[in-house]
């Protein structure tokens, strides 16, 4: 089991603030270029899946409450399915966009902040990130499902969107408790 | 030679109703029926059943009484067509003999579809299912041989009988039967026709086994039908998941009717029995009119012209039954150890140790599956299993009679998981 360096106090506040700003940046991106352009959509969708799988695995290992651990299991299951569906969609495209293989700096920072969260703050930090990430993902997928420039990827987005919306509803519910 | 049902004239609907003597016609003779005449009959029965069930489901979601009336009238004729086709199968042909015919359909029809599928991902989907149905043929053939009837009488020289992907390993978590759907707007029309074809065939196989699998008296025979019927449920999930889920009911109706035209035209061209050829031709004339009515309904209700998505020049490739021995052998060599993870087809070695596949296998195979028991029974009685290998020994060494079955990657993966 990895020995996560835990950030207490001021560093923890800074991490959370940076995540929130990143979330705003992400939402703006999802609402503009990411919404219609295949390359941009695929990049953000794949990074979204990679982020959710890493965050989910961390939460399964460190989550304190049972609802958070169950959410983590659902995230891992559903984002694995989503990643596979997207890979299968590429197989039907003559020239599929090149997916990224790792997180961008913004999402890598989020994972780093999650790793460094103190044990008694982990669940809250995780849920906060999940809220930001899912708000961004829902906007990205909804926009592309409506206006994307490739019909096969539009179908993928439309098929995956309801799951993302349910995740967002679940996260909202957990945060309010 | 191409065929465009949109430019042909069909039989008016009010002249399509037949009396009992016209429907309850003489079945084929077991002694001289061509194996592919049988498979054409089994296929068209499946196509008609699929159309009838689709029409019923559409009617349950239709508020428009006028459209419901049209569906009911057309469906009544489809129901007569289904009887005329299915009643060609004689009562003397036993359920298990007919089952061999079903699995020959599954192998050789799926092989044609896969070899004529323009999209590589969809081709993989068909090839994956094919190797499983191929194994079902082997298991049922062993049952039939134990009952004293020769499976070669059914399949003739056309289809080999030997292990495929072992049925015991085909049982998967339901999530791993869901593939990626096609997009009608962005795919080749042949892909759409292919999917409707195989979905109808597999759905009817599922229907057949789930309803007649309890007819044998022998517990192992009953168990074999039960087990394979569960796989056919998997196959229907697998094939229906490649269909475009965004289409309107009327679009589906038009595509189904177009598909029926294509199938009857195909089989009319291939049929060797003149009496049955005449049935295919008659039904083609009926379906052309059903298609016209469906197109008119789409124009009137959705204000869309089916010419938007139907091929302007029609189709030039009939679906035909031919032998596929070399093709199936190559698939066995390359893909017998494939499994599925969500929408992806992968080698069994790619599954992580905690994959849901292993938990599912452990649960349902807690007792020995009937598909293994039937082979063991044949070996005990005859010294070996039943096979019809016309092109040499099995292409996979582990699946040969003298092969070490436990060296198959599936046995290794499942055995390793069970030990942990």
Image (cartoon, coloured by chain):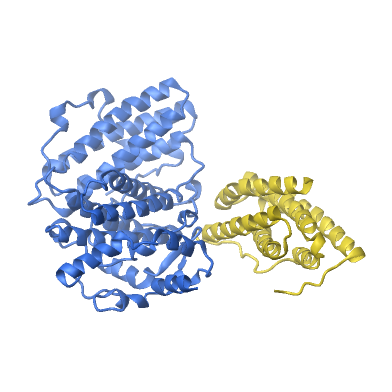
Chain assigned blue? B
Confirm whether residue A123 shows in the render.
yes
Q: Residue at x 14, y 33 (%)?
A: B24
- Residue B141 left/right relative to A33: left
Q: How many marks?
A: 0
- Residue A57 left/right relative to B363: right
Is residue B256 shown above or below B370?
above
Which residue is more in the foreground, B203 or B253?
A: B203
Is residue A8 shown above or below B174?
below
Residue with the most extreme top position? B65
Chain A color in figure: yellow
Which residue is more in the foreground, B200 or B350?
A: B350
Q: Picture quarter containing residue B159?
A: bottom left
Residue B225: x and y in percent read: 28, 52
Q: Residue at x 77, y 53 (%)?
A: A132
Quadrant housing the N terminus of chain A: bottom right
């Amino acid at each position: 089991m990895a020995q996560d360096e835990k950030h207490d106090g001021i560093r923890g506040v800074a991490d959370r603030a940076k995540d929130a700003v990143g979330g705003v940046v992400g939402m703006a991106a999802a609402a503009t270029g990411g919404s219609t352009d295949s390359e941009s959509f695929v990049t953000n969708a794949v990074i979204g899946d990679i982020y959710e799988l890493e965050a989910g695995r961390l939460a399964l290992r460190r989550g304190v409450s049972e609802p958070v651990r169950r959410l983590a299991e659902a995230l891992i299951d559903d984002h694995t399915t989503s990643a596979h569906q997207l890979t299968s969609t590429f197989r039907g495209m003559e020239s599929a966009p090149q997916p990224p293989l790792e997180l961008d700096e913004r999402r890598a920072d989020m994972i780093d902040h999650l790793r460094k969260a103190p044990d008694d703050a982990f669940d809250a930090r995780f849920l906060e990130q999940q809220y930001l990430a899912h708000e961004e993902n829902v906007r990205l997928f909804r926009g592309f499902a409506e206006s994307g420039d490739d019909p096969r990827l539009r179908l993928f987005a439309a098929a995956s969107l309801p799951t993302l919306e349910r995740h967002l509803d679940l996260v909202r519910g957990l945060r309010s408790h | 030679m191409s065929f465009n049902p949109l430019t042909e004239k069909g039989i008016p609907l009010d002249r399509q109703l037949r009396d009992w003597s016209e429907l309850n016609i003489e079945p084929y003779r077991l002694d001289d029926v061509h194996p592919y005449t049988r498979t054409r009959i089994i296929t068209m029965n499946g196509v008609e059943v699929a159309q009838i069930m689709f029409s019923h489901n559409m009617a349950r979601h239709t508020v428009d009484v006028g459209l419901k009336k049209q569906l009911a009238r057309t469906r009544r004729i489809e129901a007569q067509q289904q009887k005329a086709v299915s009643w060609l199968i004689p009562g003397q042909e036993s359920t298990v003999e007919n089952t061999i015919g079903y699995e020959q359909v599954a192998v050789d029809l799926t092989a044609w579809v896969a070899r004529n599928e323009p999209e590589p991902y969809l081709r993989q989907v068909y090839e994956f299912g094919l190797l499983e149905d191929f194994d079902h043929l082997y298991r049922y053939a062993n049952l039939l041989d134990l009952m004293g009837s020769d499976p070669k009488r059914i399949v003739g020289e056309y289809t080999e009988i030997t292990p495929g992907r072992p049925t015991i390993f085909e049982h998967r978590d339901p999530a791993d039967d869901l593939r990626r759907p096609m997009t009608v707007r962005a795919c080749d029309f042949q892909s759409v026709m292919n999917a409707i074809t195989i979905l109808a065939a597999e759905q009817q196989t599922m229907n057949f086994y789930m309803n007649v699998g309890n007819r044998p008296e022998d517990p192992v025979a009953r168990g074999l039908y039960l087990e394979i019927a569960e796989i056919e449920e998997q196959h229907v999930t697998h094939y229906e998941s490649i269909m475009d889920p965004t289409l309107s009911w009327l679009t589906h109706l038009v595509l189904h009717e177009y598909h029926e035209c294509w199938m009857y035209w195909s089989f009319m061209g291939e049929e060797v029995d003149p009496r049955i050829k005449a049935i295919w031709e008659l039904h083609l004339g009926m379906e052309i009119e059903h298609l016209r009515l469906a197109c008119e309904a789409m124009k009137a209700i959705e204000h869309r012209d089916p010419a938007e998505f139907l091929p302007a020049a029609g189709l030039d490739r009939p679906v035909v039954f031919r032998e596929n021995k070399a093709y199936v052998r190559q698939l066995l060599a390359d893909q017998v150890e494939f499994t599925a993870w969500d929408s992806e087809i992968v080698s069994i070695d790619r599954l992580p140790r905690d994959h849901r596949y292993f938990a599912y296998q452990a649960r349902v195979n807690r007792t020995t599956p009937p598909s293994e028991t039937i082979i063991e029974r044949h070996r005990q009685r005859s010294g070996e299993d039943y096979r019809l290998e016309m092109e040499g020994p099995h292409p996979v060494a582990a699946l040969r009679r003298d092969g070490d079955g436990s060296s198959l990657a599936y046995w290794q993966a499942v055995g390793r998981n069970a030990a942990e």
